[in-house]
Image: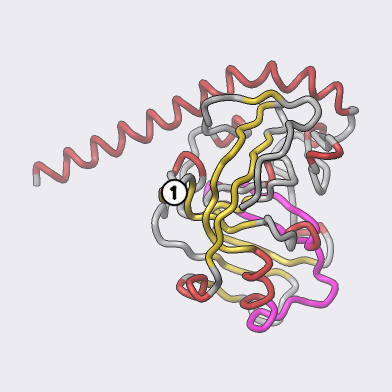
Amino acid sequence: MKESSPLPPGQVEIDDFPRFGLATFAFRFPAETERIEIAVDGDVERPMRFAEELQTLERVEQVSDLHCATTWTKRGLCWGGWRFRDFYEQLVVPRVQPEADAALVVLRGQDGLAQSLPLEDTLAADVLLADRLNGEPLGVDHGAPIRFVAPAHYACKSVRHLNAVEFWRDARNYRFPGPRWLMNPPRARVMYEERGSVFPPWVFRTLWPLMIPPVRWLYAQGLRRRQKRAWAAAACKAKR
């Protein structure tokens, strides 16, 4: 297991672990929360979907920190799942056959979020397709049924509710779901403080923390609304 490392520059440790992200996605949830299925497409020979095939890969557990670009860090999270590198080398390459120069990976979640990373970053040993967190099945608040986890990058790259992975030769099929001025750089590496584009890191260190309270509130409201709908559906079912 990998031990938690010292806090990177500009980060502050938090005790709780909130559901958090772009405000646009606060009220968006996955349609499927249990069955894991990942569609693979892009500049490939044969687009495919993988579900049960994931069970053929070696399961791993690792302890790593999650760093949000808005300056908070949750330390010592124990993720369980499969290495993305194994997924790529054992399933994607032989069966889907990406083009040799398809070096941009686009990750899409059921909530509509899309992020991208260079292929070389996704093949790092600590990048996971995680379906468990701290010994329990991954909850919907943190990405059920499966989440892409890339500890060396800000949490925006750790796409929740992952259901599609695409391999492209360039970025023509990828669009960040937000204003261009706050678009994260292609890699969003924590060690280089790649918090956003246009402005230097110290500007984002100052601006992002101001957004934390209202965004946390929005995401909490989203969870409450979803829970109320689940209760109402269960009550309706019980009356039948």
Q: Residue at x 64, y 78 (%)?
A: 90
Q: Looking at this view, is 149 or 165 the one in front?
A: 149
Q: Is residue 109 magenta?
A: yes
Q: Which residue is identified by label 1?
A: 135
Residue 69 screen position, x and y as percent: 73, 32
Q: Residue at x 72, y 76 (%)?
A: 44
Residue 48 screen position, x and y as percent: 58, 76
Looking at the picture, which amino acid does disc 1 mark? Gly
Q: How many marks?
A: 1
Residue 205 is left or right of residue 64, and the answer is: right
Q: Looking at this view, is 11 or 110 the one in front?
A: 11
Question: Picture quarter containing residue 153?
Answer: top right
Residue 89 is left or right of residue 185, and the answer is: left
Q: Looking at this view, is 122 or 95 the one in front?
A: 122
Question: Picture quarter containing residue 202?
Answer: top right
Q: Is residue 79 magenta?
A: no
| Mark 1 residue crowding within 10 angstroms, few (<14) / some (14–19) / many (20+) | few
Residue 139 screen position, x and y as percent: 43, 44
Question: Picture quarter containing residue 197?
Answer: top right
- Relative vertical location of residue 3 with respect to residue 162 in this rendering, above or below: above
Q: Which residues are magenta?
A: 93-119
Q: Residue at x 73, y 26 (%)?
A: 11
- Relative vertical location of residue 3 with respect to residue 179 in this rendering, above or below: below
> Looking at the image, which residue sits at the far left?
240
Q: Secondary structure at mark 1?
A: loop
Q: Residue at x 81, y 28 (%)?
A: 9
